[in-house]
Structures are given as structure tokens and as C-alpha cells.
Amino acid sequence: MSTAATARRGIPEASVARLPGYLRSLTTLAREGVVSVSSEELATAAGVSSAMLRKDLSHLGSYGVRGVGYDVDFLASEIAAVLGLTKDWPVAIVGMGNLGRALAAYRGFAERGFRVIALLDRDAHVVGEEVAGQVVRPMTDLEALVEDDGLSIGVIATPPEGAQQACDDLVEVGIRSILNFAPGVLTVPDGVTVRTVDLSTELQILAFHGQRVAVPEVVS
């Protein structure tokens, strides 16, 4: 069994959440022609402490060489393997409103190994439209997409009131990995992983921090 395959077992969720940041930084360094990088340099590029970086990478194995640092290409390939990025992941986007259409046109998915194979919507008036070079398909095509095309990840971009139904439809056909852009908490059975990106919540958090900066300190 490979080191990367072994590392998938038991790696903490918090460390998993930081691995894409390390991979992004390593990819940038590789493009710049950097061959090796110290833990301090990589930590700075990824926005974490060097101690946290070393702890996270310790779950993958010992890749650093004292006095030399990490081999950029090798470490990037190991992180990609741990994240499961050594193969393409077929993706379907559910909900062709403004957000769904923007996601459909986003090139970053393909660049990172996520191939959008279908755009879906429940509205008969939207089905059949062409969006980002693909024809929008009905939700009834989900099962065939799983069986014939290996669909493995669902992206929910519906309004909040339609998110749970979209989630249920994905789970029913065997999808176990879901990225949700609709506000709210989705109910799923054990074995299904949901990652929620709530843009409004993130803006509210930014407003909180912005308010703290903007309010002048009162001098008595």
C-alpha cells in the first residue's frame, strides 16, 4: 500500500482542511521554478504557522530533509494523492440560477481534476437551455449519470427552499459527496459528506470584523 493511501487513514479533519492550501502554495512555487522549500517558507505561503504545517505533514509521512526542506514536486504529488486528486472526479451542478450558471462557467473545477459532466434543474423552462457549453438536463437523469458516467460529486446551487430536495435526490442515486452553496443545514444519512459554503454567513463575519476596525476607540 502506498504512503499516500496509508495517510488517508486517521488523518484529522482539521489537517485535511489545510491540505488544499498547502497544495495550492506548492503548485505556485513549482510554476515559479522552485525546487525545494523550507517549512517556514511554505507555512508563510499557506498562511499557517510552521509548527502547524509540520504537524499536518507528519500525518502524511516524513518528507522534509533537515537543512534542505521539502521537495516541492514530490510533496505536491503526495498531497494530491492523499486528497484523491490523482483521478478525475465527475461532478454535477444542481440548480441553474445565477450562482449555478457562474459555477458552471468556473474553469477552476477542471484545472483541479473535477470534471463537470452535467448541469441539472427541476424547472422545465430551464431544462434544455445551454449554459457554459452544456445543455441543462432534468433531475430524472441523475441515476443514469451515476450508472453510465460515474457521477460521484453533487454541487447544490439551488435556492434554500429547494436544497434539501436536491440533496435527497443526490443521496437516493448513491452520491456520497455533496458541496452545498445553499444557506441552511442539510439532513443526510451516515456515510454522506456535505461541505457547505454559505456566502452570506462569510459576509456577516467580515462585517463583524470590519465594524471592529471601523469603530474608533473612545479615550476617556
Image (spheres, rainbow, N blue to C red):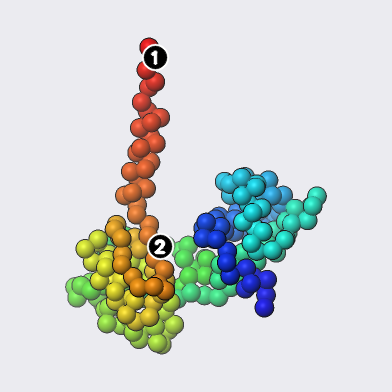
Q: Position of residue 32 (x, y in %)?
A: 66, 53
- x 42%, y 79%: residue: 151
Q: Nearer the viewer, residue 132 or 16?
A: 16
Image: 142 above or below 195 = below
Specify the label residue 20 is tagged with.
Answer: none
**Residue 92, located in which quarter of the rendered image?**
bottom left
Q: Which residue is mark 2?
A: 195
Q: Secondary structure at mark 1?
A: loop
Q: Position of residue 2 (x, y in %)?
A: 67, 75
Q: For the image shown, how many numbered marks are present on the structure?
A: 2
Q: Which residue is mark 1?
A: 219
Q: Secondary structure at mark 2?
A: strand
- x 42%, y 84%: residue: 149
Which residue appears farthest toward the top when viewing the image? 220
**Residue 161, located in which quarter of the rendered image?**
bottom left
Q: Position of residue 116 (x, y in %)?
A: 42, 72
**Residue 116 visible here:** no
Amino acid under label 2?
A: Arg
Residue 154 located left or right of residue 108: left
Residue 49 located left or right of residue 93: right
The image quadrant where one finds the C terminus is top left
Q: Position of residue 201 (x, y in %)?
A: 33, 49
